[in-house]
Image (cartoon, rainbow, N blue to C red):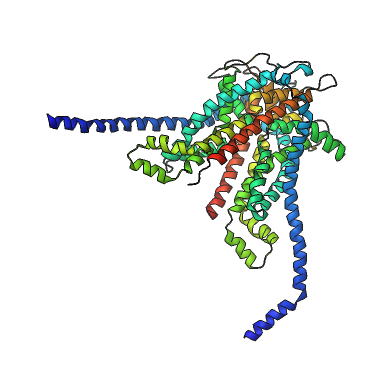
Amino acid sequence: MEAASFDDKRATPAFGVARRRWSEDAIRVLLLLAALISVLTTTGIVVSLAREAWVFFQEVGVGEFLFGTEWSPIIKPQSFGVLPLVSGTFLITGVALAVAVPLGLGSAIYLSEYATPRVRKTVKPILEMLAGVPTIIFGYFALTFFTPTILNDILRLDVSVFNALSAGIVMGFMVVPTIASVSEDAMSAVPASLREGSFGLGASQLQTSLRVVFPAALSGIVAAVVLGASRAIGETMIVLVAAGQIAALSPNPEEPMYTITSFIAAIGKGDVATGSIQYKTIFAAGALLFVITLVMNMISIRFVRRYRQVYE
Amino acid sequence: MSDVTAAAFEEIAERGPLSRTSGRNRLRELAFRLLLLACLGASILMLGTLLVDIAGDGLGRISLDFITEYPSVIADNAGIRAALLGTLWLMAVCALFIVPVGVATAIYLEEYADHTRWYNRAIEVNIQNLAAVPSIVYGILGLAFLVRGPLDLGNVVLAGGLTLGLLVLPVVIIAGREAIRAVPPSIREGSMALGATQWQTIWRQVLPAAIPGIATGVILALSRAIGETAPLIMVGAATFVSFDPDLMSTFSALPIQIFDWISRPSNDINDYASLAAGGIVVLMILLLGMNAIAIWLRNRYEQKW
């Protein structure tokens, strides 16, 4: 009798443990399910883009879409050559990078090689604020201040109210923190021994920064620029507000022009009927945008991995 | 031997050109340093100009009526009530989605996932890629899956909030992972040694220690979501809402309202541009408030192990 009750007492915690293990497994599965939501998101993006884009490409040939020079999906005669959107996207991205690459890299070299830790700690958050400003605000700024005051009045440029130049320059400032912070990480990851060796050979700080640290961090810097470019390509609101809504295959940044993103948003703004050709253009253009930015992100991730492998 | 060295040193010391070169070098050093400072200064100057310009345009519009009135075709009577409520609704839906899902994913990846398994690595790469997908693509996803298509919710607050939630989920996951990783293994080992199960260890030891970091990440994610405009355009946020929205109603949002006012041509009678600037000021105040909370959280609870 006594022995049996003793056994019972010992058995109870053992059962408890067993039950807990079962719940441990259940929790593990629940957590995995949560993690799978992000995979589902990607799947959802790919499926939604591919499905409608597929239907679109049965009406419009892939060749006509990719190489056509006329984009007029609403006004008849309709035409679905995406090149004007692509050229607008790359032109504005080019302007943005022309601003963001020198400013971003200059800031990064200063923060990584020259600034005291205290200055770095104060200045970095201020610089990052530029990346935190909602892009609709940059759009407002480009349209109501940068174009009329800076471009028209101060620089005396004869740009239209809506133009690619203003959108591109303002977008450049939005991209500066991305380029600065990723390339500063790469420069900070360059071992101090390389700098010490350079100084030991009598090189100045300028020579050390530009000829030792910069090349050593090059893969990270390339990653930063590619990531910045991908940000610029994917940005919608600045161009939608400030660059105008005309599909123009033109190399002149003083003119208004659509980008892939601003076209998508302009169509999305109206209530387009599901299944109409306009609805499908959203997905065809979206698929193109997704592929371009995905490829650039992959390149960027690969370059970041390269410098991590070398120095960490 | 030592004479030779001494002579060499003397020669070096006497040589004028060396010091002259170093003088020119010093000038070049200074110029380079100034150039770098100019790069940094240009960006900060731009930020300052933007803030001053917006405050100048918009502060005059800020009044109690501006906050409490519905939109109106007469600019002087227009307010942001519906847009502000819409934004608060969106943030609530977004937070309720990203906190559990983001934290659970972070826990899974840090505490459970075996990183030699291909599917766990695939989840990580996937999150990295999602973080860089343009926001308008999330809008397309929301349009095709949530508003229309399988879920068919219509252009309601729930669809908008979930779309924003999917957009900023990677921010929460990445911040959550860092916060969890920063909890030293000795805490876990101590807990396990006392007989706690893995989940008990996580729930009672790891998570409480990681909460400040996670909370900071959530606030940063929400401060990104609050200013997003493009995805909301795609999911059909309305520009003229004259009722208080709820979970399953159509909605407007602050950035959408701002965008609508920017798009209208301004004239002497209806100054929509200053309305937009007023909306921007309110949006910036919300953003600064959120960031201040995040910074305070980080400084107040930051733990060095």
Relative to A271, is A150 above or below? below
Residue B37 at what x, y percent from top left? Answer: 73, 51
- Residue furthest top as drawn: B243
Q: Residue drawn 62% across and 46% down?
A: A182
Q: Is residue A92 left or right of residue B224?
A: right
Q: Is residue B150 left or right of residue B274?
A: left
Residue B77 at what x, y percent from top left? Answer: 76, 16
Relative to A121, is B144 above or below? above
- Residue furthest left as drawn: A1
- Residue furthest front as drawn: B300
Near-viewer residue (A282 or A111)? A111
Quarter of the figure with residue B298: top right
Q: Is residue A130 left or right of residue B149?
A: right
Near-viewer residue (A248 or A158)? A158
Residue A257 visible in rendering: no
Q: Is residue B161 left or right of residue B16?
A: left
Relative to B90, is B190 above or below? below
Q: Residue drawn 50% across and 32% down?
A: B102
Q: Residue drawn 58% across and 19% down?
A: B148
Q: Residue drawn 67% across and 39% down?
A: A129
Q: How many marks?
A: 0
Residue B117 at what x, y percent from top left? Answer: 42, 41
Near-viewer residue (B128 or B18)? B18
Residue B24 at what x, y percent from top left? Answer: 78, 65
Quarter of the figure with residue B146: top right
Quarter of the figure with residue A100: top right
- Quarter holding the N terminus of chain A? top left
Near-viewer residue (B149 or B187)? B187
Residue A226 visible in rendering: yes
